[in-house]
Image (cartoon, rainbow, N blue to C red):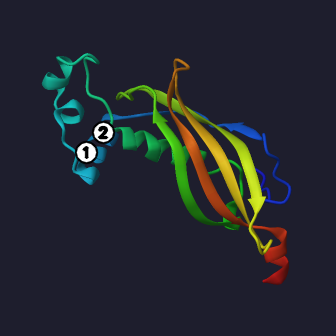
């Protein structure tokens, strides 16, 4: 993937990642690292009796996967300074072991900081399941170097 810069990045630019399949090991690791062992995530017998009929991933695991899969879009590499936050994040559908997911990323806004040496990029991330169903979506913001910062330092 070719590298791009804040200065040449266009609002409306879009990307789609390749897919990846969520595994049993990921669900276990998510329970372990979060400490969230609710039976809807960890107990196959219990979750079989729920409306979904099976264990589901924690909603925050979808955020983790979506943001990670969206990182290369756009390809800003070492120009990224920091993550600034997220907004409008919605859980639209559950994630299950065996689901294959991909992300769609769109640049929805960009602006220079007041000193003009850095820029803020807003990108909408959509996490979709293999059947085309929207699972999660939201907007993330990143602080990035601009050509002016490169020229100064």
Q: Is residue 120 above or below residue 22?
A: below
Measured as percent of width and height from the top left, residue 57 is found at 33, 35
Q: Residues within 10 Å of mark 1 (few under 14, many from 20)?
A: some
Say which mark, if any, is on residue 17: none
What residue is at 22 percent from the left and 51 percent from the top? 35
Label 1: which secondary element: helix
- Number of marks present in the image shown: 2
Q: Residues within 10 Å of mark 2 (few under 14, many from 20)?
A: some
Quarter placement of the C terminus: bottom right
Query: Does the residue at mark 1 contact the one at mark 2 (Cβ under 8 Å)?
Result: yes
Measured as percent of width and height from the top left, residue 86 is found at 53, 51
- What residue is shown with label 1? 31
Camera-nearest residue between 54 and 51 = 51
Camera-nearest residue between 66 and 141 = 141
Q: Is residue 91 left or right of residue 87?
A: left
Q: Residue furthest front?
A: 114
Camera-nearest residue between 55 and 87 = 87
- Cα–Cα span, label 1 and label 2: 6 Å
Q: Is residue 100 above or below residue 29?
A: above
What residue is at 13 percent from the left and 23 percent from the top? 45
Q: Is residue 5 left or right of residue 104?
A: right
Measured as percent of width and height from the top left, residue 74 is found at 71, 50
Q: Residue furthest bottom?
A: 153
Q: Is residue 141 above or below residue 147?
A: above
Label 2: which secondary element: helix
Q: Is residue 73 above or below residue 94?
A: below
- What residue is shown with label 2? 27
Res 84 → quadrant = bottom right
What residue is at 55 percent from the left and 44 percent from the top? 69
What residue is at 17 percent from the left and 17 percent from the top? 49
Measured as percent of width and height from the top left, residue 63 is found at 45, 43
């Amino acid at each position: 993937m070719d590298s791009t810069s804040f200065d040449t990045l266009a609002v409306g630019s879009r990307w789609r990642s390749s897919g990846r399949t969520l595994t049993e090991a990921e669900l276990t690791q998510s329970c372990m690292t979060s400490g969230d062992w609710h039976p809807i995530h960890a107990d196959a017998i219990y979750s079989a009796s729920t409306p979904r009929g099976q264990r589901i991933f924690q909603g925050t695991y979808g955020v983790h996967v979506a943001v990670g899969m969206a990182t290369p879009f756009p390809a800003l590499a070492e120009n990224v300074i920091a993550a600034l936050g997220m907004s409008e994040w919605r859980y639209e559908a559950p994630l299950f072991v065996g689901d294959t997911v991909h992300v769609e990323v769109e640049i929805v806004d960009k602006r220079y900081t007041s000193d003009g040496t850095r820029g803020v990029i807003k990108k909408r991330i959509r996490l979709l399941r293999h059947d085309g169903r929207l699972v999660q979506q939201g907007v993330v913001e990143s602080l990035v170097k601009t050509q002016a910062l490169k020229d100064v330092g």
